[in-house]
């Protein structure tokens, strides 16, 4: 890094890198940043191209059952290379490695968490090579870099690893040894024994944040395929709007209730260094996007948006005694943890506890371990109001319930006052779109929004 200068971190998500047009657009954004301030360090962090992680995981699971087929991922990337007019052999080294790896899984028994991590790693490794190569076509001195080669060391919790203390110093020294623009793999690290690990949910964002913290970066920009953080999912609510700013606590509530936005855990290292954090839209690179702030004005209280979870299960657990309650709740959460899902909403009524969880592979079958004292109900969803002080305003909750009732939505459970900055409502999955639109209209009618095009 040039002495006395500031680093800028640009992180690009999988949706922004979905196709050839997207990759070229990303390279253009990087080029503009580089040309504008060539003496300031630019570091790029990338996710896998959209859909690739799922393809990799499915191929690994199939191979572990004896069905070896490396072609899906390969076809996906070769189509991308054609779109970009890049030579078809650019990634051949990785196809050989991928094929050998899948063959080994066919003889290794059940797929382990460590093997799944290795399978998923191909997504970011391939993406970094593609993006760096396209950047060179734009005349940029870009070089692909695996994060572990920079010294990013994690613990050994495969699928949800966390960086070890001291990684910041290693990252800074590693980056100082690279000329030009590093295009770094997000999501990936290695443990102290050299085993590849993945950083779990928001892992690529965490990689970018760790690099920003290590370099004392002036700012970090998270580039996505949406207009910053939105008031609602635009696929559900056509008149959803971009938010000019949200607090870290509001971003946490959006993420907790299912919105695909930044999670504060992933950007906490940057926050500690007072790095400016923003979410930008690759389709509108000149737009300011959404700025994340530490606090809000005292009068900025009320809802700013709606978050949704579309595919929930409700798990009812009978607990006839206080002793049985503790045992069964512990058992429930242990089983959910093994399935990789979390209870987003929990409610207790009389001798029964209900937990709402995202539906995932194997969850209903795993719950059979709890016996006939557990019932599972599907086809549910949740919609939540998000905003500073929302959870403490019960009158606001009653107003939201009235808005849902006027839209003909039956609320199965209401979670009022449980969290400081949100209130949530469980509804039938078939009612989710109408519920989201009804609550979004309620948000825009609130005094915090009255007479404005964006959040004050």
Image: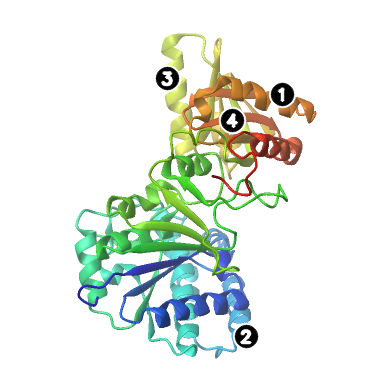
Q: Which residue is mark 1?
A: 402
Quadrant of the image occupied by residue 84: bottom right
Q: Is residue 36 left or right of residue 434?
A: left
- Whether residues under marks 1 and 4 lie with C-beta atoms below 8 angstroms apart, the answer is no
**Which numbered disc, 4 or 2, marks the residue closer to the eye?**
4
Q: Residues within 10 Å of mark 2 (few under 14, many from 20)?
A: few
- Whether residues under marks 4 and 3 lie with C-beta atoms below 8 angstroms apart, the answer is no
**Does residue 339 sit above or below 149 in this rendering?**
above
SS category of the residue bearing label 4: strand
Of the image marks 1 and 2, the number of the one nearer the N terminus: 2
**Does residue 430 sit above or below 423 in this rendering?**
below
- Whether residues under marks 3 and 2 lie with C-beta atoms below 8 angstroms apart, the answer is no
Q: CA distance from mark 4 to mark 2?
A: 46 Å
Q: Which residue is mark 4?
A: 424
Of the image marks 1 and 4, the number of the one nearer the N terminus: 1
Residue 437 image position (x, y, % from top left): 72, 40
State the scheme by which the image is colored: rainbow
SS category of the residue bearing label 3: helix
Q: Which residue is mark 2?
A: 82
Residue 352 image position (x, y, % from top left): 56, 15
241 and 410: which is toward the camera:
241
**Which numbered disc, 1 or 4, marks the residue closer to the eye?**
1
Q: Which residue is mark 3?
A: 327
């Amino acid at each position: 890094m040039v002495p006395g200068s500031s680093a800028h971190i640009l992180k690009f998500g999988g949706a922004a890198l979905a196709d050839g047009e997207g990759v070229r657009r990303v390279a253009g954004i990087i080029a503009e940043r580089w040309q504008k301030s060539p003496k300031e360090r630019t570091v790029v962090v990338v996710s896998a191209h959209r859909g690739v992680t799922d393809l990799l995981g499915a191929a690994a699971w199939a191979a572990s059952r004896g069905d070896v087929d490396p072609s899906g991922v390969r076809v996906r990337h070769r189509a991308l290379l054609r779109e970009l007019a890049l030579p078809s052999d650019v990634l051949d080294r990785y196809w050989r490695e991928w094929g050998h790896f899948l063959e080994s899984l066919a003889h290794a028994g059940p797929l382990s968490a460590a093997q799944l991590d290795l399978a998923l790693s191909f997504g970011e490794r391939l993406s970094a090579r593609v993006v760096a190569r396209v950047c060179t076509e734009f005349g940029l001195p870009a070089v692909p870099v695996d994060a572990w080669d920079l010294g990013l060391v994690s613990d050994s919790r495969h699928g949800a690893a966390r960086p070890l203390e001291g990684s910041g110093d290693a990252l800074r020294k590693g980056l100082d040894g690279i000329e030009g623009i590093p295009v770094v793999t997000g999501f990936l690290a290695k443990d102290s024994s050299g085993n590849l690990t993945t950083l779990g949910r928001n892992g690529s964002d965490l990689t970018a944040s760790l690099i920003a913290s290590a370099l004392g970066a002036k700012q970090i920009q998270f580039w996505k395929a949406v207009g910053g953080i939105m008031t609602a999912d635009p696929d559900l609510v056509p008149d959803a709007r971009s938010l000019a700013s949200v607090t870290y606590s509001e971003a946490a509530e959006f993420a907790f209730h299912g919105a695909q936005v930044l999670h504060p855990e992933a950007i906490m290292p940057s926050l500690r260094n007072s790095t400016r954090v923003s979410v930008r839209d690759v389709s509108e690179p000149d737009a300011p996007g959404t700025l994340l702030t530490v606090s809000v004005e005292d009068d900025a209280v009320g809802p700013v948006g709606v978050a949704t979870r579309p595919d929930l299960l409700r798990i009812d657990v009978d607990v006839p005694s206080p002793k049985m309650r503790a045992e069964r709740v512990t058992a429930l959460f242990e089983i959910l943890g093994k399935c990789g899902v979390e209870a987003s909403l929990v409610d207790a009524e009389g001798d029964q506890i209900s937990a709402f969880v995202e539906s995932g592979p194997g969850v209903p079958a795993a719950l059979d371990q709890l016996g006939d004292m557990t019932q599972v109900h599907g086809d549910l969803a949740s919609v939540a109001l998000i905003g500073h002080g929302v959870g403490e305003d019960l009158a606001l909750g009653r107003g939201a319930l009235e808005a849902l009732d006027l839209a003909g939505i039956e609320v199965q459970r209401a979670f009022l006052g449980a969290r400081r900055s949100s209130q949530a409502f469980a509804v039938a999955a078939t009612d989710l779109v109408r519920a989201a639109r009804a609550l979004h209209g309620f948000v825009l009618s609130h005094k915090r929004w009255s007479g404005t095009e964006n959040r004050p």
